[in-house]
Image: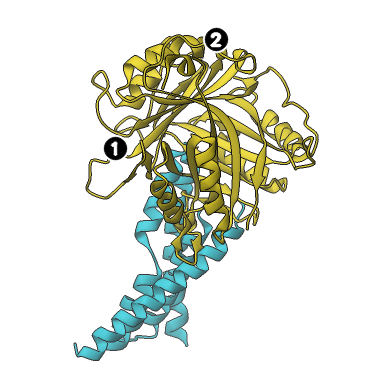
Amino acid sequence: MSAERQSCGEDCLKLTTYFGERDRTPNGLLADELADIYGAHELQTSVLLRGAEGFGRKQHARTDRLLTLSEDLPVVSVAVDGRERIESVLQSVREIKRGGLITLERARLLSGEIGEVTLPQELTESAKLTVYVGRGGRTQGTPPFVAVCDLLHRRGIAGATALLGVDGTRSGRRVRARFFAGNGQVPAVVVAVGSGERIARVLPELGELLSEPLLTLERVQLCKRDGELLASPHELPGTDEHGMPLWQKLTVYTSHAATHEGRPLHMELVRRLRASGAAGATALRGVWGFHGEHAPHGDRLLQVRRHVPVVTVAIDTPERTARSFQIIDELTCEHGLITSEIIPVAVGAA
Amino acid sequence: MSWWVWVGVAVLGGVGACGRFLLDSVLAARAAGDFPVGTLTVNASGALLLGLLTGLAVQGNLLVLTGTATLGSYTTFSTWMLETHRLAEDGESRMAIANIVVSLAVGIGAAALGRLIGAHV
């Protein structure tokens, strides 16, 4: 890849599927089938993330708090590669008889040597950076996701959350987490949000830090931070210029320890969104991260209460997103970082 | 124990586990709050039935099959403990303590009530 192309990244697509861990297709589990397809297409990267709680279109509540309800947790499968390859993968994915929701988002992909980066206009104000790493291995003596979070914190990025995958592909190779294995090669992601300028400045450093750097940049709107309302999500029309329905994604980054009237904030968010008739929401528990001033942290041994970061995602029509934002706004009077994104393509159950 | 009792334990153990799974799924999906109502209901009803069996002076193989196998796999200590720990992890310590105290009180009460009913039938 030439240095010039590298400087602003390569256009890529991010294919995300939200479904249930136990959702089946005629060939087996949907989670396995998707990972098989991504592996067969040797995608640059894909990762399967297991949610902690959530609900979908059928409004069935799932949570890992209760044993019986945790047998079919929400999962999120993310695949990233160039436009052509994702489009051909999408073809195969759409042919599967399945439930859940598929979204397609545009992103810029950077890999290999990362030099000085000039960001396009739409990313300068705020941007979402996703760093694709392995769960294990050592980067400056710590797991790579810890090293990445520390660097992002030092450079004043608003927040970052490390999420561990259970399956996926890395550089075209399928890697699946197993019992009694190191699982160091299994993918993990660090999702960070911050000012585009600061993110641009940290990119070359990230490139040096990681042995095989792979990261994406996406456009994002910062709506609220630590109780301070910055902007309401952009009001979008129901359809785009081609008459295709538009969707919006609200993401809430909180700590497991943040509460609303004594209940963990992310649980209350999911509960209220479900009660309001939202199309769906998924809470993903991270292992390490930070937002705001706090130093990066995870859980500590012998500490009962959990302190890991949690990411809650809600995808809906623009109309319902405006309503969901009111609910989220009301609950996040002190904590949390809230972003809004436009989803150009969303496909419901086939 | 004869071989058919072993087979009976295996089959009825499975029946008890399925019963718990079904009842707990229905209750947990309907319950709005954080309190593990499903597990409490399962354990309390199991305690009541076991009390009833002993009150009725059920003995021998029949007690093994109904009590140890069926009710033993229907009720669950481990889930009770796990869900209490999960509440504590979420910082809901009052709810965690309530889950222990209420389960103990209701469980012992149910077992005593079951024995009382059994003894008077």
Residue A132 vertical placement versus B107 (above, below): above
Residue on which disc 1 sits: A185
Q: Nearer the viewer, residue A126 or A321?
A: A126
Give the percent coordinates (x, y) of residue A44. Answer: 41, 36
Q: Quadrant of residue A125?
A: top right
At label 1, which amino acid type do we have?
A: Gln
Q: Position of residue B42 (x, y in %)?
A: 47, 66
Mark 1 crowdedness (10 Å alpha carbons): few <14, some 14-19, many ≥20 = many
Q: Which chain is yellow?
A: A
Q: Which residue is mark 2?
A: A197
Residue B116 seen in this snapshot: yes
Between B116 and A53, the one lying in front of the other is: A53
Question: Is residue A283 visible in this depiction of the protein?
Answer: no
Quarter of the picture containing the C terminus of chain A is bottom right
Q: Which chain is cyan?
A: B
Left or right? Give the position of A148 relative to A178: right
User: In x, y percent, where is residue A83?
Assistant: 54, 36
Q: Is residue A174 above or below residue B28?
A: above
Identify the residue at image location x=42%, y=18%. Answer: A2
**Label 1 chain ID:** A
- In primary-sequence order, the first of circles 1 and 2 is 1
Residue at point 75%, 37% (across, down):
A318
Query: Dividing the image into 4 quarters, which one contains the N terminus of chain A?
Result: top left
Count neighbours of disc 2 (C-alpha within 10 A) and say few if under 14, some if 14 to 19, many if 20 or more.
Answer: some
Amino acid tagged 2: Glu
Distance (Cα) linking label 1 and label 2: 31 Å
**Residues at discs 1 and 2 both on one chain:** yes
Q: Residue at x 42, y 70 (%)?
A: B47
Determine the residue located farthest toward the left in the rendered image: B1
Chain at numbered mark 2: A
Figure label count: 2
